[in-house]
Image (cartoon, helix red, strand yellow):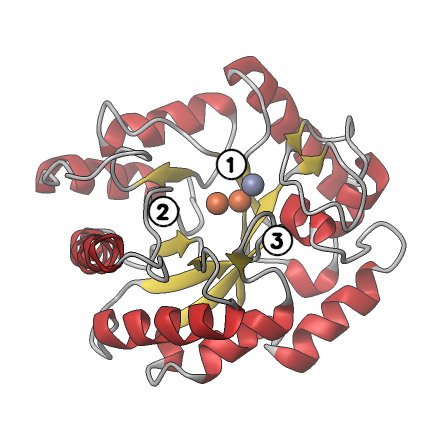
Amino acid sequence: MIYIGNHVSSSKGYEAMGKQEVALGGDTFAFFTRNPRGGSAKEIKDEDVQRLLTLMKDHSFGPLVAHAPYTMNVCAAKEDIRKFSVEMLKDDIRRMEYLPGVFYNFHPGSHVGQGSEAGIELISAALNECISSTQGVTILLETMAGKGSEVGRSFEELKEIMDRVSCKEKLGVCFDTCHVWDGGYDIVNHLDEVLSEFDRLIGLDKLCAVHLNDSMNDCGAHKDRHQKLGLGKIGEEALRRVVTHPALQGRPFILETPNEDDGYAREIAMVRKWQEQ
Ligand code: FE
Ligand code: FE
Ligand code: ZN
């Protein structure tokens, strides 16, 4: 069994997100830790979080997958953006302590012309500055499609970042099916081989969460345009094999497909049906 849910709006607070997900039929969800395009974050209300934790227990939820804002780029070429990003990362790790067992997913970053080696250095340095061995939060590097100068377009790049971080037990990977496909991994025809490759380089025990998306583009296109499940180039059969793959059971799967609520409810029901078959 896997946990399935979607990305919900955090504007009404934590308990509201849980209620929303229950209404859609899910048992996990993702949310932005703050405005996806902006800076400052709302302080977390302890009672609100406690009510969410109770709801999650009552509905047997899996771990949640918080998402860092898109503006975060810890390997930016400009020092002020880098500093601002590291401060956001520190602050988010602190705030997510309210949610025991939460995953905190972030895009490794874009090196903007400095080269991926320099990017990898800056990302690992930022993680070493922010991660402490006592934190409860596990930080996930998201696999990227490789558009522009994105770092993390290959398992090798993610491994290189992770190898340089001293607190490895607080690090994992979020496997985005659209990004991996766009990045050149053929999960339609060679899912077993792709997962073996991930295991060889990083270890499947580090694959903590999945972003379940179809893709508008071909394998290796490096585009990053998500599509509804079954309507893209990955297709229903291949996504069903991902959901039911023995090596991926027990993980939270998050939909980031272009949908409104009714579309998410349908996709959640569809994924549950795949699991029963
Ligand atoms: Fe993402
Ligand atoms: Fe994603
Ligand atoms: Zn994406």
Give the number of the mark in front: 1 or 2.
2
Q: Is residue 270 left or right of residue 148?
A: right
Residue 124: x and y in percent read 37, 74
Front residue of this view, candidates 26 and 116: 116
Q: Mark 3 highlights which residue?
A: 146
Q: CA distance from mark 2 to mark 3?
A: 22 Å
What residue is rendered at 20% in x and 36% in y?
51
Residue 75: x and y in percent read 37, 62
Front residue of this view, candidates 243 and 227: 227
**222 above or below 199?**
above
Q: Mark 1 highlights which residue?
A: 5
Front residue of this view, candidates 149 and 63: 149
Looking at the picture, which amino acid does disc 3 mark? Gly
Q: CA distance from mark 1 to mark 3?
A: 25 Å
Q: Which mark is residue 66?
A: 2
The C terminus - image quarter: top right
